[in-house]
Amino acid sequence: MESFNPNRHLKEQFVSNLTGSSKLELFFLITNLSILILIRRYIGFNWIRFGSVKKDDNAASSGKSLEAFIVVLAIDFLCIAVPYILFLTILAEWTYWNTIMVLLLFLFLRTFHRTRSSFMQEGGVDSIRGNISSYRVSMVLVTCLSILAVDFKIFPRRFAKTETYGTGLMDLGVGSFVVANALVSRQSRGISNMGLQNGLRSTSPLIVLGFARLISTSSVNYQVHVGEYGVHWNFFFTLAAVAILTLVINIHPNYCGVLGSFILVGYQALLLSGLNAYLLSEERKDDIVSQNKEGIFSIFGYWGMYLLSVRIGSYLFFGDTADAVVKTRKWARTRVWALCLFFWSITLLLDQHVETISRRTCNMAYVSFTLASNLQVLAIVMLSDKVSGCKTSALEDAFNQNMLASFLLANVLTGLVNLSIDTLSVPPISALAILFAYAFILCFAVGFADFLGIKLKFW
């Protein structure tokens, strides 16, 4: 039987044995992507000012709302998704110059920005909650665009996932999902847990998705880099495992930081005692643990990361009371910047004096690196408090309503592209066109789902 994916091994080699980029370049790249959110807000013309179809009972009015929504979503696509793709592909060699350009554009718009009272959002949406949503969407959108772009030669290899040690942009993917969800989780908000039975029921879709991915990739001979999680393990199993551990060992957010730190220190001690050599070796036995050693053992790192993020979210935004009152903007913004600088400092110390950053093992340096990068995005986005205009775009609102579902759709579209064409032989211009088309379909599909009130909750 002819394979659906005859170039599977070539594609696997294309994303293997990579060493990543410098932390400085990633710092500037993340800065560029984050400032685009601020620039979009200065431009204005946000969906909120047009109303929502869900509030319109008149058919004609709904039609006008849909037309307005499409226009605004198109503006969001051009201002956010298109520059994202350009920064990750043909403009990647000029990351530092890109930073200067986006900063100059940001300062220009801020200097000459005029208040448009009739076109701006006036209250209603809490500023801090909107900033958290924007940060979460920014990280998810970068991940969704990267998972397809990495299969083309136009995407720099240094941005792809590293083989053993190092820092690549895509190394932040699963860690960012963990952090983004933990910061606003029920636990961080001080809301009582839903109970073990209900919690397991809500986690079951992740397990189903994990097995669905495993079966689908095996059935079509899809390329899978075994060094990422193992032979059978994948992203969804990791999220499910973290969710289950959090349900079983449910503690007050005040103590999550302490428990997370103990878990990370203990896990790091095991890594330095020889576990890292075992996890990074290519040798695999026939048992299920050895076959999936990276995915199984890295759970401890991601669990510790989740607990630290819960404590950070509680401390920064929700306080320590059960009513989860959001704290003031200035208070939160100052401490986000302080924590961002703190974790970047810890990252440099751990990377140089303990163990080099490794996503594959999810060591302490990787946890600190992920927290620093996510807090950096959040800190920059929180500068939008000074923007006298709309606080969130239609694209941000849409992705925020269906974060994991958006990532699932991105995976499906990525698979269809890879099974339809030989991505390794596509010339740069064609690759760019495919990425634009992919981003367009993804953004508008997620946008229309939000417009119609469709919300899928997996985690």
Image (cartoon, rainbow, N blue to C red):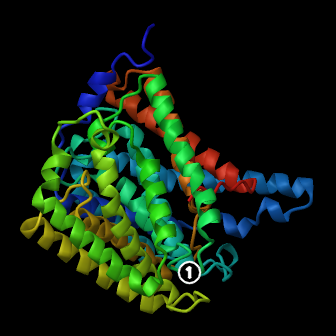
Q: Which residue is mark 1?
A: 127
Where's residue 436, x and y in %? Answer: 47, 39
How would you rate the neighbour count of disc 1 (Cα within 10 Å): few for under 14, some for 14-19, many for 20 or more? some
Q: 57 above or below 409?
A: below
Indicate the position of residue 418 as horizontal and vertical percent values.
43, 27
The answer to which image quadrant residue 108 occupies is bottom left
Q: Which one is in front, 288 or 333?
A: 288
Please say if 211 is above or below 455.
above
Q: Residue at coordinates 24% horizontally, 54% vertically from top-left?
A: 361
Task: Determine whether 240 is above or below 289 in the image.
Answer: below
Q: Does residue 92 appear to the left or right of 35 in the view shown? A: left
**Residue under the point 45% across and 17% down:** 4
> Which residue type does callout 1 highlight?
Ser
Residue 190 sits above or below residue 2 on the image: below
Residue 165 at x, y = what percent?
Answer: 16, 52
Identify which residue, 33 or 185, lies in the foreground. Answer: 185
Q: In the rendered image, which quarter contains the N terminus? A: top left
Residue lying at 63% horizontally and 63% vertically, measured from the top left: 197
Quick check: 160 left or right of 18?
right
Question: In this view of the protein, which residue sits in the foreground, 380 or 175?
Answer: 175
- Is residue 354 at all visible to an observer of this figure? yes
Q: Quadrant of residue 76?
A: bottom right
Where's the C terminus, which quadrant?
A: bottom right
